[in-house]
Image: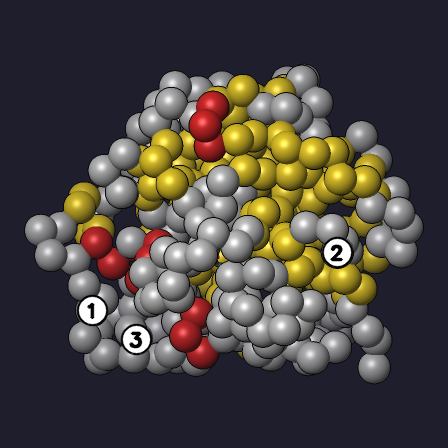
Amino acid sequence: MKKARYLVDHIYTADAAAHVFKGRLYIYPSHDIESGIPENDNGDHFDMKDYHVLSMDSVDGEVTDHGVSLDIKDVPWAGRQMWDTDAAFKNGKYYLYFPAKDKTDIFRIGVAISDRPEGPFVPQDHPIIGSYSIDPAVFEDEDGKQYMYFGGLWGGQLQRYRTNRAQECGEEPDDQDSALCAKVALLNDDMLGFSEEPRDVLILDEDGKPLSAGDHERRFFEASWMHKYKGKYYFSYSTGNTHLLCYATGDNPYGPFTYQGVILTPVLGWTTHHSICEYKGKWYLFHHDSVPSGGRTWLRSLKVIELEYNEDGSIKTIEGTA
Ligand code: FUB
């Protein structure tokens, strides 16, 4: 069995978003810290305050930590908790997308800009209009259009919204009802906002029915990622409380997507989160676990392992212990 490689051990890192910029592999992780906040279902113990960017020119090679690329104290609208980030490139600029709670403790998604992939990034003075919840993932299609996927349940606050509007008392649907969906929106040409109302990323079962809210082994929880392989769109995500990374495929960036299976079985730790990236002709799964911190769920460490496909385009399941 192939073994995953831990990327760095001088800081705790999680939620890797991997991209190839200028021929080099850049990783945009969360930067986990020990802030002493007790563990709870709201995720308050994930109390991150800045981002670092990592880069490497081979998955086995030396990893460069470019230092702090964005600090919460420089984001005028942010209150606390800088969670999973992602980055994109357009017209000579690099864009860092990040969720943080605003001063009223509501998650919003912000954007910061740099001339360089490693930053430092200069934040806009307000979050993206119409943004909410967590875990932005930006996908550039072959026609140059860029889409943001986002959303996360429980501490990620997605259950507080229906049709993009906050609810008086937002809760998850009953088990037999359709599951809540991740969201997707086409980005504006300036990359600073949504050019449309976010739409549902619908995941269907083998009979063409939407997954139900009670289907905890398959329904979307958080950690959206999109990649394209042999012309098909692969939407991958975490099932949260059942700790699986799963995927569903479709024929366009909006879906609907049909559930296909498990990419990664549970890792040590509560969260599981990933990105999938092609580099130098091979595909890789970047993810994290809490092994190096002795199982402390809020102190996670990034790993990378090769991702393989079967002839029919299905992904070979990887063991979380690899
Ligand atoms: O890192 C904080 C949160 O944990 C992320 O936003 C989630 O996806 C989970 O990995």
Q: Earlier in the sequence, mark 2 or mark 3?
A: 2
Q: Is residue 280 left or right of residue 175?
A: right
- Screen quadrant of the C terminus: bottom right
Q: Measuring 44% from the left and 56% from the top, which residue is drawn there?
A: 36
Compute the Cα span from label 2 to label 3: 39 Å
Give the residue pinned by disc 3. Answer: 212
Give the residue pinned by disc 1. Answer: 173
Q: Is residue 231 left or right of residue 70?
A: right
- Crowding at dot 3, Cα within 10 Å, few <14 / some 14-19 / many 20+, comes out as many
Q: Which residue type carries mark 3?
A: Ser
Q: Ligand 1: does it lie within 8 Å of the C-beta at label 1?
A: no
Give the residue pinned by disc 2. Answer: 9
Residue 87 percent location from the top left of the image = 59, 36
Compute the Cα span from label 2 to label 1: 40 Å
Q: Which residue type carries mark 1?
A: Pro
Q: Measuring 44% from the left and 20% from the top, which residue is drawn there?
A: 124
Q: Say what secondary structure mark 2 lies in.
A: loop
Which scheme is used to colour this image of the protein? secondary structure
Q: Say what secondary structure mark 3 lies in.
A: loop
